[in-house]
């Protein structure tokens, strides 16, 4: 039995979205300076100019959002739940930062009451930044992962996450065994995968902290539960890469440690990939897996410049991640700007237009996670949206009021927008912030 329809709403706004990929389609940006989106039962039913949608739906009540910018909700494809309270540990390279900042805090997640508070802080931060879907690196503790799914369910966030598993070189209390990794993962998948908006991601932390036995346990979960997603880290830092080489002498490269276990596929999202080989890029493209680019983290941890051009030339799909807490905050506007800066500064960088940045922050994430009902405003997709409406008197407000085109306003949103400019957020048509 289908539930009865609710009344439609016609949103009137300056809206922009990328129904296509601007790296392959030059006219990918769809910008409506006076646009209309008809939403019913959480789904976009019609989209276009306000005049055109109004004419077809003369009786729908109108919600007037003019004055700001309406964008698809942001999709963060790499962000760590247990690290929200340690954002800002600047000045350390990856392995020192893990030892001194991240892992001591992650050990605190054994305490369920603590984890519940962190889940609230974390999801509040995501939604406050306009993020409506996230691939979230979970916790090493199954109870903390439960707490996360509960909070995601309460808030309405579209969350893909799972138990983080490791069995070496971290701290003893963060280690597990292959059997326990499988058993706890299985129980979490059965409880949460496909429940409401939740999906499960099998998540070995990185090969540096994973034996072949743990990676095989991850592969067993992927085999036994088709449809679960996979995420981990790869090629972030040169010392990390050398250590992985030493730990897996039989592997051709870092990717091969995952590939041999059968963990590289269409539902795999590998974070960073700052230092890939050509072989790794070729295999990632062939398996249609995604590289999640985390420019603020790469800058803060001094990991290096992401070779976007090489990824695009090889045909590797790229999305965006905030990588909190190696990253510096939840805003994908800031990540877009940092990606733009870094591509500008590196030899052979890819010039990124506002359309590229919007795509990376929205549809690219939907494609990475294989969530075709999110990421743009095309009719049939869920109404996941963020309304940027800066306070009067702010520089972004001044630009918005005087912008010569919606695309200029979009560029300014990436250049100077922050969570303070997020006025309202919807997920599946429900207001989850503001309103
Ligand atoms: O940026 C990162 N953050 C982490 O928490 C992590 N763990 C392994 N590799 C990592 N990289
Ligand atoms: Zn990370």
Image (cartoon, helix red, strand yellow):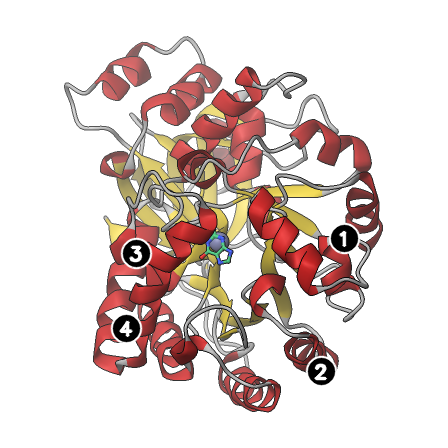
Q: Secondary structure at mark 1?
A: loop
Spatial separation of the CA atoms under disc 3 and disc 4: 13 Å
Q: Are marks 3 and 2 in contact (CB under 8 Å)?
A: no
Spatial separation of the CA atoms under disc 1 and disc 4: 33 Å
Q: Secondary structure at mark 4?
A: helix
For discs 3 and 4, the disc positioned in front in the rendered view:
4
* Viewport quadrant of the N terminus: bottom right
Q: Are marks 1 and 4 in contact (CB under 8 Å)?
A: no
**Vertical placement of 417 versus 99: above or below?**
above
**In-image side of 145 versus 362 (left or right):** left
Residue pictured at 33% horizontal, 43% vertical: 329
**In-image side of 217 versus 171 (left or right):** right
Picture mark count: 4
The answer to which quarter of the image holds residue 424 is top left
Residue pictured at 19% horizontal, 20% vertical: 394
**Mark 4 crowd level (few <14, some 14–19, many ≥20, 10 Å Cα):** some
Q: Residue furthest left?
A: 393
Answer with mark 1 or mark 4, whichever residue precedes in sequence.
4
Q: Nearer the viewer, residue 319 or 424?
A: 319
**Which residue is the site of mark 3?**
84
**In-image side of 337 versus 66 (left or right):** right
Q: Are marks 1 and 3 in contact (CB under 8 Å)?
A: no
Q: Nearer the viewer, residue 392 or 298?
A: 298
**Which residue is the site of mark 4?**
108
Answer with mark 1 or mark 3, whichever residue precedes in sequence.
3
**Mark 3 crowd level (few <14, some 14–19, many ≥20, 10 Å Cα):** many
For discs 2 and 4, the disc positioned in front in the rendered view:
4
Answer with mark 2 or mark 4, whichever residue precedes in sequence.
4
Q: Which mark is residue 253?
A: 1
């Amino acid at each position: 039995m289908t539930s009865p329809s609710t009344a439609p709403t016609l949103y009137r706004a300056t809206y922009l979205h990328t129904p296509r990929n601007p790296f392959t389609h030059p006219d990918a940006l769809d910008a409506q300076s006076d646009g209309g989106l008809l939403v019913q039962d959480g789904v976009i039913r019609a989209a276009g100019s306000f005049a055109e949608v109004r004419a077809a739906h003369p009786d729908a009540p109108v919600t007037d959002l003019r004055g700001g910018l309406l964008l698809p909700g942001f999709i963060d494809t790499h962000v760590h739940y247990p690290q929200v309270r340690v954002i800002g540990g600047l000045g350390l390279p990856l392995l020192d930062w893990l030892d001194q900042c991240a892992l001591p805090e992650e050990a605190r997640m054994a305490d369920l009451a603590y984890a519940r508070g962190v889940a609230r802080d974390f999801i509040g931060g995501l939604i406050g930044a306009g993020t409506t879907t996230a691939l979230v690196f979970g916790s090493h503790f199954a109870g903390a992962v439960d707490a996360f799914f509960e909070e995601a369910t309460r808030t309405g966030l579209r969350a893909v996450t799972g138990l983080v598993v490791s069995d070496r070189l971290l701290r003893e209390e963060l280690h597990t065994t292959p059997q326990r990794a499988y058993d706890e993962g299985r129980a979490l998948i059965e409880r949460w995968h496909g429940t409401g908006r939740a999906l499960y991601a099998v998540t070995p932390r990185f090969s540096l902290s994973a034996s072949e036995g743990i990676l095989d346990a991850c592969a067993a979960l992927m085999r036994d539960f088709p449809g679960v997603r996979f995420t981990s880290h790869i090629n972030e830092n040169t010392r990390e890469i050398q250590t992985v080489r030493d730990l897996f002498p039989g592997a051709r490269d870092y990717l091969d440690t995952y590939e041999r276990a059968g963990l590289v596929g269409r539902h795999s999202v590998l974070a960073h990939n700052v230092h890939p080989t050509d072989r790794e890029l070729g295999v990632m493209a062939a398996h249609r897996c995604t590289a999640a680019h985390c420019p603020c983290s790469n800058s803060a941890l001094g990991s290096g410049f992401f070779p976007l051009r090489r990824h695009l030339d090889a045909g590797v799909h790229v999305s965006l991640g905030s990588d909190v807490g190696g990253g510096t905050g939840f805003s994908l506007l800031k990540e877009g700007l940092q990606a733009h800066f870094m591509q500008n500064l590196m030899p052979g960088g890819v010039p990124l237009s506002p359309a590229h940045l919007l795509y990376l922050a929205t549809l690219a994430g939907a494609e990475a996670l294989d969530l075709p009902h999110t990421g743009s405003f095309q009719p049939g997709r869920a109404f996941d949206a963020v309304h940027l409406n800066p306070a009067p008197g702010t520089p972004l407000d001044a630009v918005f009021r005087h912008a010569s085109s919606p695309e200029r306003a979009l560029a300014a949103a990436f250049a100077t927008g922050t969570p303070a400019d997020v006025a309202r957020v919807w997920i599946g048509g429900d207001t989850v912030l503001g309103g």
